[in-house]
Image (cartoon, coloured by chain):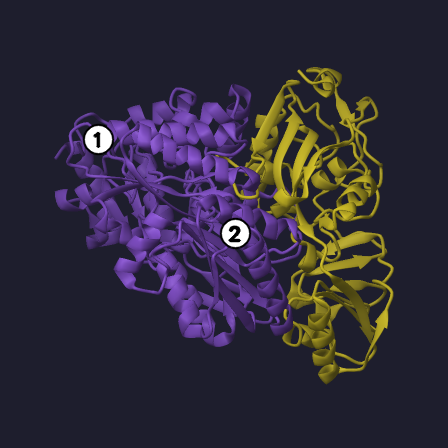
Amino acid sequence: MSDFAKLVGAEGPVTVVGGRTRWHVGGEVRPDAREVHAPSGVVSYDPAEMTVTVRAGTTTTELTTTLNEASQRCALPERGGTVGGSVVIGENHPEVLGRGWLTSSVLQVTYISAEGKLIRGGGPTVKNVSGFDLPRLVVGSLGTLGLVEEVILRTNPIPPRSQWVESHDADPFAVASRVLRPSAVLWNGASTRVLLEGHAPDVAASLNSLTAIGAWSEVDGSFELPQHRWSLQPAELNGCSGTFVASIGVGTVWRDEPQPRPALSPSVIEISTRMKNNFDPTGRLNPGRSAF
Amino acid sequence: MTTADDALLADLKRVLGDRVRADSAERALLRRDASVFDGGSAGPTCLCESTEEVQRVVRIALAHGRSVVPRGAGTGLAGGAIPLGAPVIISLSRMNRILEVDTDSRIAWVEPGVVNLDLTKHLTPLGYHFAPDPSSQQVCTIGGNVGNNSGGPHCLAYGVTNAHILAIEVVLADGEIVTLGGLDAEPSGYDLRGVFIGGEGMLGITTKVAVRITPNPPSVRTLLLSFDTPRDAAATVSAVIAAGIVPAAMEVMDQRITIAVENYVNVGYPRDAGAVLLAEVDGLPDGVDIDAQRISDIGRQHGATDVRQAASDEERMLLWKGRKTAFGAVAQIAPNYYLHDTVVPRSKLADTLEEVYRIADEHDLAVVNVFHAGDGNLHPLLLFNGQEPGIYDRVHAAGAKIVEASLAAGGVLSGEHGIGVEKQPYMHQMFSEDDLDHQERLRHAFDPACRSNPGKVIPVGHSCADIQSLRNVPEEVWG
């Protein structure tokens, strides 16, 4: 049994604390829940396998530093907090088009169950369909089904060149027809910033292609993103107004105010309720918080 | 024919008329899929044409105490579609319409019976394709791809099916219709969509799918590298990834299969090479030229005796034709084959491959290897004559050793074919009792009574509800 399993135990309400950067997502944890911390540290990393095994309590900053030293990166957002926290929040990187979706990048999860047992799902290789997909269940689960101890993530090489460019007159919705694989297309209502990545000549060619729809200048980075993420369909983004940054082609919109929680269908709620009850029959894991 | 089945048939026919099939020829056909596994027993087959029909059939089966098994093209290689316990078979092959293509949002809504390659052909004039491209893509269906989280050569760069599905309409085992996932960026709640994919039809029946469509790259370079040994080819694959290149595909074929393919379709593969590596990069013209040159250099550093770049689209298609017809080509060597599917870390490819050859020798079986090297996804084909007495015991014994060797190398049971009935007995080698218990809990959240495709994936004896579901069949029916 792992030390973390002993710490979590099998009885009494318990909550796992990461960096507290997304503490309020999914509701307030009941005050009587005992606080525990997941172990930290990069366990193993082989860039040639494009996988990293990392403990949940590791800060995303530490992980990013380790990967960058080997000219790699992963799908986790680099906005502070811990690896485990980011995985259970399920938030994608603002450059998701270039980084890949978080849910696809979690290859294996090891977590402590409500009964205090160590459970492993998924596998260590980049490709795997061995049994029911526990990693997909854990991503975005807010720690309500099991407390993550360790994950194996897929990594990817950092492209030779990355360049943000900005335009004040281009139609953000026309970018996709000009650039094959932009890593991000962000729009704040007044201007558009595009992240071009790849070999230097490809980046130059893409920028050249973009000039057909507006005037562009190189900028240092992305927009400052408001705190709250809204999840919309890509087709709904042209209706955005007020203070916002929208990820064109993706549907994420960052705003100062949180998105009202969309209503899930009764059937989805029924499956989700059974899932929660099957994994945490006494409701001891992060009580008060709900993923649905 | 028994009274119990007369009543079931009568109820099904009230909904589907002559689209219920129950004659003995049909039942014999549907007892199997493309795997080597036998032992299934089919109940009536229902050729459904709409979600509502699937729902009604599921409810009728439920009322008669029978389980249901969804079926697409039946190309599965792990026995996932084999009917156990005379279930009602729900054929989705007639639900084969492409409902909507939205190039602005890069989404298409399709029915589960749409053939994988038909979708890509439909999208080609629009400048798009569906990225997962299993070798069976000329016949396998999108519903089957969802059920098995299918891969294919190009999922090295593009990802497996899970990365290309946004939403799924499902008929649950109790007949409820539910949509999992959504078209928005990060749908709220548990990722039930992600969980459902690869569920092998045991979490419900797919009736509609929203797939992500991928723009066709303007430039593609395909290289054929020849090596003296599979070890050199495998080392090249690792070195390419280590150099920070993620090609669209990296496929390796050993000498025996290369010669068989050459005899079969004559695409210009070298007959004297110990192994060939088919590598493809795609994207913008300058970048693909840079990467193609680097792959070529890395190959030569690792012993490539020849590097050929396809000079035209026709030549490129020809090189791929060889790879995609490899499984057909083995028929010249032996009448039967058993295709395995395990994954190992890339760095263990060469060692595991040598182990595979050794195991085949030990069991006096011929083996050829054609596989997704970039993902570490091995596909050894054990070749045999099914008429030879006792041959299947030897084939299965060799298969078990291959699985064992792959797990010992730090690998997994299946990369893209799934568990079905084939890998069930090995689940304990990869997972603990507690791990399997949690997989079972996941399954029960979708299907508490184990009515959808029972008896697969989770080892027999582990799941009481499954056994119950299989035993409920009246003994006299559908033998």
Image position of B412 with respect to A266: above or below: above
Residue A242 place in picture, x, y as percent = 84, 66
Q: Which residue is mark 2?
A: B303
Compared to residue B430, the image places residue B189 above or below, namely: below
Q: Amino acid at mark 1?
A: Ile
- Distance, label 1 to label 2, CA atoms, is 38 Å
- For the residues beneath circles 1 and 2, the answer to whether they share a chain is yes
Q: Residue at x 79, y 31 (%)?
A: A29
Point out the image quarter for the N terminus of chain A: top right
Q: Which chain is yellow?
A: A
**Residue A174: x and y, percent?**
68, 77
Residue at the image position 35 percent from the left and 23 percent from the top: B468
Q: Which residue is mark 1?
A: B391
Asked whether B237 or B59 is in front, the reply is B237
Asked where in the image residue A95 lies, by quadrant, the reply is: bottom right
Examine the rendering and report whether any part of residue A17 can be seen.
yes
In front of the other: label 1 or label 2? Answer: 2
Residue B381 at x, y percent in the picture: 33, 42
Q: Left or right: B52 with respect to A33?
A: left
Q: Secondary structure at mark 1?
A: helix
